[in-house]
Image (cartoon, grey):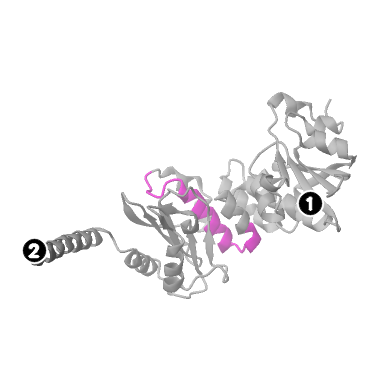
Amino acid sequence: MKRCFKNFMLVMVVFMVALAQANAAEPDLEQMIRQGMEEIHVQKGAPDLLVVTNAPYLRQNNTFGIEKVLLLEQMTGCTTGGQNMLFFQRPQTNPLSITLFHKTTGDAAIITWSNEKKIKETMNLSPSTVSEKSFWDNKDRFCGPDLFTISTIAGSWALGAPYDYFKCAELHNHICPGITSGYLIARMIQRDYSLKKGEKYTIISCPVWCKEDAFMAMLDTTPGKGGMIVKKLTKAQKETITIDNPAAILLITDKKNNIGRAIVFSFDFNKVKALVPKESTKPAMAFAMLKYLDQPEKFTTVSGTFAVTGDLYEKMVTAGSNPYELIGLTR
């Protein structure tokens, strides 16, 4: 009995030593957050502090990244309700990314935390800085592809973008002119084409670009619930469309028989490019568009309205059909 107890104690001692060594070898995330706040000269609860993280989307070794959100709230004072903790989607196996951003100075501490490396980088992410081409010349930053995500979200927050805009960015995982175009079209739909009792939206997003993610976030038109049909067109098909800058077709129909109307939207990216000097970066264009988020008509137009029967509805949403051809908008 004594021998068994001694063996058990020996195993426990070895286990505790190994655990202590593992913990000692792993950097302290809490300490890195504290150091990051000190480096960008911001205190807990400061109104100009923003946290940007992918934590809610991660799962590694049966541990969910959402557990880190409570730590961030406790240490920074930032919360989702305060609209100063923002998220972005990434695959579950990605490294944890945490950015602490100081709106007044533009300084940021970016923590990238994985099993291989734990790195904290500091840099300036003010909208004016990340709008410059020279900012993107440095390819050696450890945060890698997350930098575009972090910088566009932080810059848009600094410029006062509304919260629903960041919900689009969360799903899309960054901000760009494409996701902004979807936000603007969705705003026009909300303003000018609200649903009546018994009606539903079905969006045929065609041709395809980033805008689809904004439709899902703003209008709850998800493919899984049948609210959005995404159809890619070939170059030859696009060239046959008789309207300029086609973006999407909104079907507003009754839920029972799919009878109603179709509204065809166009979006003019040439007007977006006109907001900034030639050869400007995508962040610069996206930031320039923020001034017009409540003016979708500046870039978005209705190029046609058509009656929809139940039969036409089925043909338009079915795979293999060209919806523009079905409503007579091709040559």
The residue at the point 72 percent across, 44 percent down is 228
Mark 1 or 2: in front is 2
Please indicate, yes or no, whether residue 206 appears anywhere in the rendered image: yes
Q: Which residue is mark 2?
A: 3
Magenta span includes 152: yes
Is residue 134 depicted above or below 156 in this figure? Answer: above
Q: Residue furthest left?
A: 3
Q: Position of residue 73 (x, y in %)?
A: 46, 70
- Magenta region, mostly helix, strand or loop? helix
What residue is drawn where x is 35% and y is 52%?
114
User: Which residue carries the number 1 mark?
Assistant: 297
The amino acid type of the residue labelled 2 equals: Arg
Judged left or right of residue 208, residue 99 is left
* Up-down relation of residue 171 to residue 304 (above or below): below
Q: Is residue 267 visible?
A: no
Q: Tell which residue pokes out farthest to the front in this image.
A: 1
In-front residue for pair 290/68: 68
SS state under label 1 = helix
Q: Nearer the viewer, residue 53 or 184?
A: 53
For the point 87% across and 31% down, which residue is it? 328
Q: Relative to residue 294, is residue 331 depicted above or below?
A: above
Q: Give how far across and how far down residue 159 sits, in percent.
A: 59, 62
Please name the amino acid that badge 1 sits on.
Answer: Glu
Mark 1 → mark 2, Cα distance in angstroms: 83 Å
Tell whether 158 sits left or right of 204: left
Across and down, in percent, residue 131 comes to: 53, 50
Query: Which residue is at the front of the view, 2 or 244?
Result: 2
Of marks 1 and 2, which one's residue comes earlier in the chain? Answer: 2
- Residue 13 in the magenta stretch? The answer is no
Give the structural element (helix, strand or loop) at label 2: helix
Magenta-highlighted residues: 140-165
